[in-house]
Structure formats: structure tokens, C-alpha cells
Image (cartoon, helix red, strand yellow):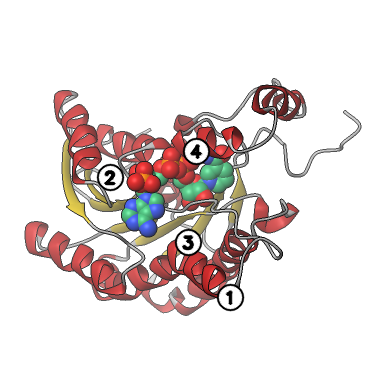
Amino acid sequence: MDLGLKDKVIIVTGGAKGIGEAISKLVAAEGAIAVIAGRSAVDNEKTIAAIKAAGGKAFGIEAELGDPAACKKVIDATVKEFGTLHALVNNAGVNDGVGLESGNPEKFMASLQKNVSHYYNLAHYALPYLKQNKGSIVNIGSKVATTGQGNTSGYAASKGAINALTREWAVELLPFSIRVNTVIPAEVWTPLYETWISSLPNPKEKLASIVAKIPLEQRMTTSEEIAGMTVFLLSPQSSHTTGQIIYVDGGYTHLDRSI
Ligand code: NAP
């Protein structure tokens, strides 16, 4: 299947590591230009080099996305370099453990800033260009929005907001044929996941107990499996799909607990 993404300019936030890295690599493998927006120029360059070595096109923008001005810079720098923008993948986020008891009002607001504000800010600044191209937005959410996790109020509130914004933006952007969808991972081995599991008591046992409960094949989802759905949703092959929240999780969130 030709996904029709050749030469499309696609921003991937946090596109240098983990799920974002897999998305950047897959969009580039489909002939698109992966614009990697992340806080570390060194990490960005590493992934760009791998994409280029595989014959793909990529460009990096160093940005701490919690800063609204940096979000504007990401869009401006992309358009300056390529003259246009076709799609946005809002992916960067961190499960930062700001709980009801362990956190405080300042930490809670800072968590929203890290996890959801830049989803809005980037979509806002990208909008004029997405309108020109009947573009597409894919957000990466989390199962936490549906299941809760405990001790992560800021992250959970952000991911809940991302689900709501998916439907809200899908409606607002109907007149421009801009599609908005969200992909929900549950358990994907990435640098973020490794940090999170290591923060728990008995991480090895905890990991084994989680993996045993993943219905499909009792294994974690790969970053590439998240990327596959994301890139399909970016592409014109999904041209009548909008406002959807799609769980790529081996059935972890929804299937019967008794299986
Ligand atoms: P990851 O391994 O930490 O990779 C995320 C990348 O984004 C890193 O390069 C990180 O930089 C960068 N980043 C994060 N926040 C940023 C910011 N404010 N400004 C600039 N760059 C930023 O994370 P991941 O596991 O791939 O997660 C990607 C997305 O999937 C997140 O939205 C996460 O909530 C969601 N998710 C993941 C899982 C999972 O099982 N892994 C489950 C549910 C949802 P640093 O390395 O410098 O932090």
C-alpha cells in the first residue's frame, strides 16, 4: 500500500527517542521529511543520522516544548526550512509522578505544561499551514486517561485532556478537512518506561506481572507498532478517519480480566 506521504513535512515532537523515534524513522521510510522537535540537539542529531544513513530525510529543531515560545519556534523554523507543513505528531510527554499527596499546586501546573500545553500550542501555531494542506494531527495519549495509575495526577489530567482535545479539534477542524486522531499506548519499552519501572519497588517482578497481563501474546507493544498506526492515521489512506482514540495495546485496556 502506498501511504502517499512522499515529501510531506511532518513534525514529530520527542521524535528522537522511544515511540517518537520509531515514528520519525517510519515517516522517513515512507518518503516524508521527519522534523524532529526535542529538547536535546545531541539526541535529535543521533536519530537524524540514522534516518539519513537509511536513505531518508530528517531535520532537527532543539526545543524545550514546555515553553510556548519554543513551540512557535518549532513551527516557524519548519516553515522557514521547507515552506510548508503537512502534519503534526504530538508525542513528547513524561509520566512525572505528581500525585495528589506527593505533589503540590505548582508541580501539578508544571506537569500540565510538560504534558499537554505544548500539544495545544503546536497545533495552534501549525494551524495556518495545516489548513493549506488539509493536514493531519496525531496525538499520542496514554491508557492512564482511562484507567488511572495512582500518584500521577498531572500526567493523568494531561492525557485525559488530550482525549478531549482530540474530539474538540476534530470538530473545530472539520471545515478544513484536517483530521485529528489519538493513538493510545499502554506498555511500550522505551527510555521513559525504563525510568518509570525502575522507580518502583521490585521493578523486575513488577514488569513480569504487567507483561503477564497483556492479553495478546503476553508481551509489550513495540514502538514500531505504535508508529505503524500513527503513520497510517497521518496518511491519506485513513482519509475518512477523524476524532478517533485508538488503543494499540494488545488488548490491555479493554479486554476481559478473566482471560
Ligand atoms: P521517551 O522514551 O522519554 O521519549 C520521549 C522523547 O521526548 C525524549 O527524547 C524526551 O527527551 C522528549 N521530550 C519529552 N518531553 C519533552 C519536552 N517537554 N520538550 C522537548 N522534548 C521532550 O518517552 P516514550 O515512552 O517514547 O513516550 C512517548 C509518548 O508516549 C509520551 O507522550 C508518553 O506519555 C506516551 N506513552 C508511553 C507509554 C510507554 O509505555 N512508553 C505508555 C503510554 C503513553 P528527554 O529524553 O530529554 O526526556
Instruction: Tell us which disc is closer to us: 4 or 2.
Output: 4
Q: Position of residue 170 (x, y in %)?
A: 50, 70
Which of these two is toward me, 197 or 169? 197
Q: In the rendered image, which quarter contains the N terminus? A: top left
Q: CA distance from mark 4 to mark 2?
A: 17 Å
* Marks 2 and 1, the one that precedes in the sequence: 2
Residue type indicated by callout 4: Ile
Query: Label 1 amino acid?
Result: Pro
Please identify, in this view, whether the residue under mark 4 or under mark 1 is nearer the observer. 1
**Residue 256 percent coordinates (x, y):** 86, 38
Q: Secondary structure at mark 3?
A: helix
Please identify, in this view, whether the residue under mark 2 or under mark 3 is nearer the observer.
3
Residue at numbered disc 2:
5
Q: Earlier in the sequence, mark 2 or mark 3?
A: 2
Q: Which residue is mark 3?
A: 115
Q: Position of residue 33 (x, y in %)?
A: 20, 45
Does residue 158 lie above or below 12 as drawn?
below
Marks 4/2 in contact by CB < 8 Å: the verdict is: no
Which residue: 16% across, 60% down?
78
Numbered tag placed on residue 226 in the rendering: 4
Q: Quarter of the image holding residue 219?
A: top right
Graded by Cα atoms within 10 Å as few (under 14), some (14 to 19) or many (20 or more), the crowding at tag 2 reads many
In the shown orientation, is residue 23 left or right of residue 257?
left
Q: Is mark 4 within 8 Å of ligand 1?
A: yes
Q: Are marks 2 and 1 in contact (CB under 8 Å)?
A: no
Q: Secondary structure at mark 2?
A: loop
Q: Which residue is at 28% across, 52% downward?
A: 39
**Image point (18%, 33%), residue name:** 56
